[in-house]
Image: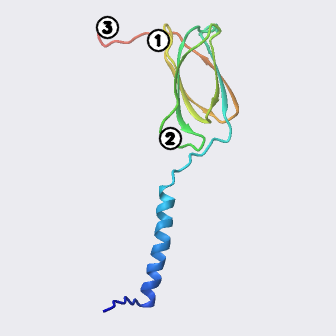
Amino acid sequence: MRFRLTLPPQRTRHLVLSLTVVPLLVAALWTPVQAKKPPYYVDLKVQVNGPDGTPVRFAPIVVQQVSNWEGKRVKHPLHLELKTSLKGKIDLQQLPPGSVLIQVIAPHYDTFGKIYPLNKPAVAITIQLRPPQKQYSIYK
């Protein structure tokens, strides 16, 4: 005895569609998403000066990426810990565009921190550090 499966025309159409569309969707979802490349890279120059305008030598600087060029948070942000040169400068090349937080934590000066946009191919930043402020205490 032979079995013969007969389906109504609508069911066969749905079956054919599901057998062709579902594998295409699965293949599209399994392919890795390519990260977009930035339109350009940024060269960053930072000059750190004291209150009198003299360069601060060997000042520790932290550069941390806050967002990318689209304004979105980054999964694995760039994080650099550097020290300035004898002339109080750091030069960074080929940084991705977006926003970066620059912190300067130099002894004998107030800690400095500010978010800067990197939206041009070359960015130069001059940071003027202040002398430490008087500490306040409730016990005086």
Seen in the picture, residue 78 relative to 53 is either above or below; the reply is below
The residue indicated by pointer 1 is 133
Name the disc covering residue 116, or none: none
Asked whether, in this view, residue 118 is left or right of residue 104, the answer is: right
The amino acid marked with disc number 2 is: Arg
Q: Disc 3 versus disc 2: distance between alpha carbons?
A: 44 Å
Image position, residue 73 (x, y; %)? 50, 41
Asked whether, in this view, residue 97 is left or right of residue 113, the answer is: right
Q: Secondary structure at mark 2?
A: loop
The residue indicated by pointer 3 is 140
Which circle's residue, 1 or 3, is located before the other in the chain? 1
Which circle's residue, 3 or 2, is located before the other in the chain? 2
Seen in the picture, residue 41 relative to 80 is either above or below; the reply is below
Image position, residue 52 (x, y; %)? 62, 7
Residue depicted at 66% across the width and 36% down the height: 119
**CB under 8 Å between discs 1 and 3:** no
The amino acid marked with disc number 3 is: Lys
Q: Secondary structure at mark 1?
A: loop
Who is closer to the viewer here, 135 or 7? 7
Nearer to us: label 2 or label 1? 2
Nearer to us: label 3 or label 2? 2
Residue depicted at 29% across the width and 10% down the height: 139
The residue indicated by pointer 2 is 73
Residue 116 image-quadrant placement: top right
**CB under 8 Å between discs 2 and 1:** no
Nearer to us: label 1 or label 3? 1
The amino acid marked with disc number 1 is: Gln
How crowded pointer 1 is (Cα within 10 Å; few <14, some 14-19, many 20+) is rated as few
